[in-house]
Image: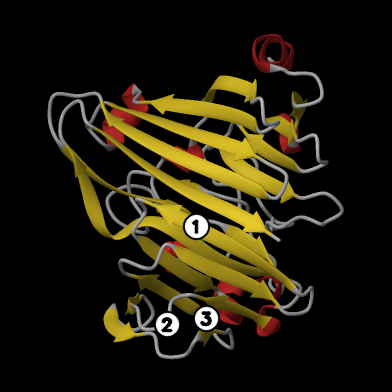
Amino acid sequence: MLEELTLQFGIPGAVGFVPGVNGLPKAMLSHESGASAEVYLHGAHVTSWRVVGGDDLFFMSAESAYEEGRPIRGGIPVIFPQFGGGPLPSHGFARLTEWEPTLAAVEENGEVEFALHLEDTPATRHLWPHPFRLELAVTLTERALVVRMTVENSGAEPFSFTEALHTYFSVADARRAAVRGLQGVTYIDSLRDDTREVETPEAITFTEETDRIYVAAPHVVQVEDQVRRRIITIEKHNMPDVVVWNPWTAKAQRMPDFGDSEYLRMVCVETGHMAAAHTLAPGATWQGVTRFSVV
Ligand code: TA6
């Protein structure tokens, strides 16, 4: 399989394919600046992003599963067609399924692009009775990673979905991390019966389990790692909401694919349609983009 992938999509020095954990195929993206990223075909799951001279900007759990039917824990889980709990598996089936590459390219400006797609199958239609086409495009530049998600309603009936890029950021110590840009925004507190509150402090800091959906959030949010003196900027387009999540101690212990103390090394800041579903008419397409950058 890796040979076929390399023949069809490999670009020397820019896009290669290697066996990941448990032999799951993984694309390795390399930018001329020395920046790099990694994408598993399982779930179209980005599991690493580095800029030259830096360590990984995404968190990956040492306890993550890498197997059919289970999500990879960390990086950027692709959430579709259901965010959170409900009639489908938690956070939907897109992150549980093998995607197929559709494009690999190096642009004139040196940016490296890699895209994958997922279409409905008998298994997905059994869970969710709608034809669809999903694409994820990852673009690597010197100091940024741009992720574009496209959903097409290829059926004859409208459908509604929620979606997210459920990104896990690496921090040296969550007790010395902050999320900025959400002051004054209304959030749904998933830990307090979905009550709605308004974010008052300028920065969100972490001292306990935190799980909030910020509704119609500003387009720019920042994650600050005060230990590493690093700020990651998140710019979102057509992805209205933001989730801020840290499991803290008790939930971390309840998660089988997450180390008990790993909550100290990550902060999730997620972008998408989580507060309300998006509806697509037959033949219509939705596209959302999130750009991660670090100075
Ligand atoms: O995005 C926050 C959240 O919905 C939390 O409630 C927590 O469940 C987290 O996602 C992880 O969910 P998962 O299904 O990946 O264990």
- Label ID, residue 209: 3
Quadrant for the C terminus, please.
Answer: bottom right
Question: Disc 2 or 1, which lies upstream in sequence?
Answer: 2
Q: Would you say residue 99 is visible in this rendering?
A: no
- Label ID, residue 235: 1
Q: Mark 1: which amino acid?
A: Glu
SS at mark 2 in the image: loop
Quadrant for the N terminus, please.
Answer: top right
Instruction: Identify the residue at image location x=58%, y=65%.
Output: 255
The crowd level at tag 2 (other Cα within 10 Å; few <14, some 14-19, many 20+) is some
- Label ID, residue 183: 2
Q: Mark 2: which amino acid?
A: Gln
SS at mark 3 in the image: loop
Up-down: is 96 above or below 63? above
* In this rendering, the label closer to the viewer, 3 or 1: 1
Question: Disc 3 or 2, which lies upstream in sequence?
Answer: 2
